[in-house]
Image (cartoon, grey):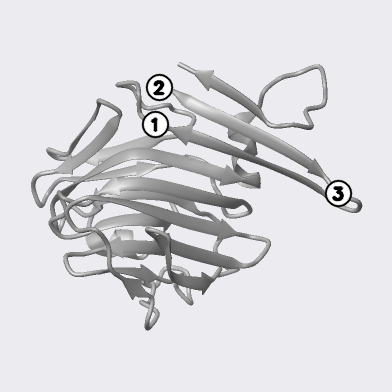
Amino acid sequence: MKIIIISVMCLFIFTNCLSAQVIDEFNSPNLDKKLWEMKKVGKASYEVKDGVLTMSSPSVESGIILYHPRNIVDMDITFEIKLNTAGLVDNIVCGSLAEIMEPQLNDNINNNLEASLFFIVDKCYVKQDPVVIGQKPPNPAGMEGQYEKNGWNIVQITFSKSKGKVTFVVNGKIIGEVDINKDVKQRFFFITSDPYTSHYTGEVKIEYVKFSGPGALSLAVVKTDKLATTWAKMKIN
């Protein structure tokens, strides 16, 4: 797996700003355990081939969810995902769950669902954090848009602890922005083509995922004897 790591440190008069970018381009048949944890049940499967991760759930009783294993609740971090929706059957979802869970009954998943972006046949739309933890998140009015139904889409989801916001962008257009629920104690970023074992099937292809912002720093730790003050770039195969 090739990971491109870019880190930068900026010094201002009163503020230190440290940020990073980590890009997983899926150039290895094995998932990087530092970046990903895959949960699948039934006949669900995944494959990394020719720089694309394919996640498939071919039957209703199957399900598959890809997680980033760190709790991001206290982070400022952006996830950029290039995904292909041609295999969408019921929905493709990118967002956050309160726990790392195996695919299971829809109520169990929905009761742990936090701010997320849903792709369905005719549109994409935002689900907001539940008002009470354990409640199914509401769908805020007007937070929806269109996407390329049989091709590639670039999704950006920014979780900003400092601003108290979660922002959703699809193909350069803001779909919606919601307030972060301060009662949420855990957030785990996830991508799925079918999170349920009681409903749905489908497939999603992912060309890359980019992690950026201060929350990506711990993924881009590079030991050095000197303080880095300029851009650094490293490739790991």
Tell me which label, 1 or 3, sits earlier in the chain: 3
The label shown at residue 12 is 3
Q: Is residue 33 left or right of residue 76?
A: left
* Residue shown at the point (78%, 28%) measured from the top left: 228
Which quarter of the rendering shows the N terminus? top left
Q: Is residue 101 visible?
A: no
The label shown at residue 25 is 1
CA gap between label 2 and label 3 equals 36 Å
Judged from the image, the secondary structure of the residue bearing numbered disc 1 is loop
Residue 36 is situated, as x and y percent measured from the top left of the image, at 41, 35
Q: Which residue is mark 2?
A: 1
Which quarter of the rendering shows the C terminus? top left
Whether residues under marks 1 and 2 lie with C-beta atoms below 8 angstroms apart, the answer is yes
Tell me which label, 1 or 2, sits earlier in the chain: 2
Question: Residue pushed farthest bottom?
Answer: 141
* Residue shown at the point (59%, 40%) measured from the top left: 216
Label 3: how many Cα within 10 Å (few below 14, some 14–19, many 20+): few
Question: Residue pushed farthest right?
Answer: 13
CA gap between label 1 and label 2 equals 7 Å
Amino acid type, residue under disc 1 in the picture: Glu
Tell me which label, 2 or 3, sits earlier in the chain: 2
CA gap between label 1 and label 3 equals 33 Å
Nearer to me, 142 or 233: 233
Amino acid type, residue under disc 3 in the picture: Phe
Label 2: how many Cα within 10 Å (few below 14, some 14–19, many 20+): some
Residue 232 is situated, as x and y percent measured from the top left of the image, at 66, 27
Judged from the image, the secondary structure of the residue bearing numbered disc 2 is loop
Nearer to me, 122 or 181: 122
